[in-house]
Amino acid sequence: MASINLLTKNLDSAFTTVEDSRTRLMTISLNMNELSNKFTLLMQKFQQQKADDSAFMTKKLDEYKDEKMKICIGVCIGSALLGPLVLPLCSACIAINYEGLIPKYTKQLREELDANIKSFDGFMVAFEKYKKAAMDIKAETQSEIMSLDEWKTSITKMRNELAQYTTIID
């Protein structure tokens, strides 16, 4: 009878340990789910930032073109008022700005935007890897929880059988 009581006590202790482990694994699983959700939100924010950055660069380029166009319009109006000798200034302004400065500035902005997008894409890849790792950990903890649940069922059956056996002996 003493050995049955000791076995029952050991099963109770094992059951408590399994239950505590299960609780910790459930917490880890929930934390991994939250972490995965946070990575998803970060990826959405970076995706939005890429779009915002592209729109900002387009706006910046449009403002630059408008500024250069205003300068050329002023030069062309001045050339028309001053006569045909100054008229080449109008075409020079257009050529300098539309054949030189604007394409150069466009290329510079494109390079900046491409570098930013590459950086954003690097973050996206990293976040995707972190998210996958979190989901892998969650899947592993879920598997462990299922194993512990099976173990709890076995322990419960053993406890019930010992209780019946103890009742029969008494």
Image: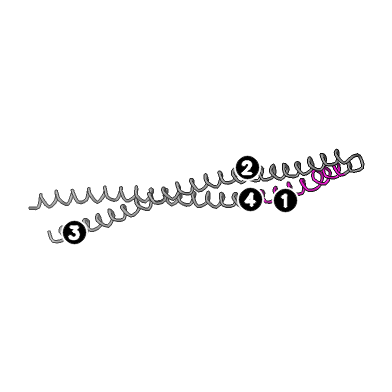
Indicate the amino acid at tag 3.
Answer: Lys
| C-alpha distance separating marks 4 and 2 | 16 Å
Q: Which residue is mark 2?
A: 55
Tell me which label, 3 or 2, sits earlier in the chain: 3
Indicate the amino acid at tag 2.
Answer: Ala
| C-alpha distance separating marks 3 and 2 | 69 Å
Q: Position of residue 12 (x, y in %)?
A: 21, 56
Q: Position of residue 169 (x, y in %)?
A: 9, 52
Residue neighbourhood size for the residue with mark 2, other residues' Cα within 10 Å, grouped as few (<14), some (14–19), many (≥20): few
- Looking at the image, is mark 3 or mark 4 nearer the viewer? 4
Residue neighbourhood size for the residue with mark 1, other residues' Cα within 10 Å, grouped as few (<14), some (14–19), many (≥20): few
Closer to the camera, 27 or 8?
Answer: 27
| Extent of the magenta region | 89-114
On the picture, is 61 further left or further right than 135?
right
Tell me which label, 1 or 3, sits earlier in the chain: 3
Q: Which residue is mark 1?
A: 108
Query: Which label belongs to residue 9?
Result: 3
Query: Which label belongs to residue 66?
Result: none
- Looking at the image, is mark 1 or mark 3 nearer the viewer? 1
Residue neighbourhood size for the residue with mark 3, other residues' Cα within 10 Å, grouped as few (<14), some (14–19), many (≥20): few
Tell me which label, 1 or 2, sits earlier in the chain: 2
Tell me which label, 4 or 2, sits earlier in the chain: 2
Q: Which residue is mark 4?
A: 118
Most common secondary structure along the magenta stretch? helix
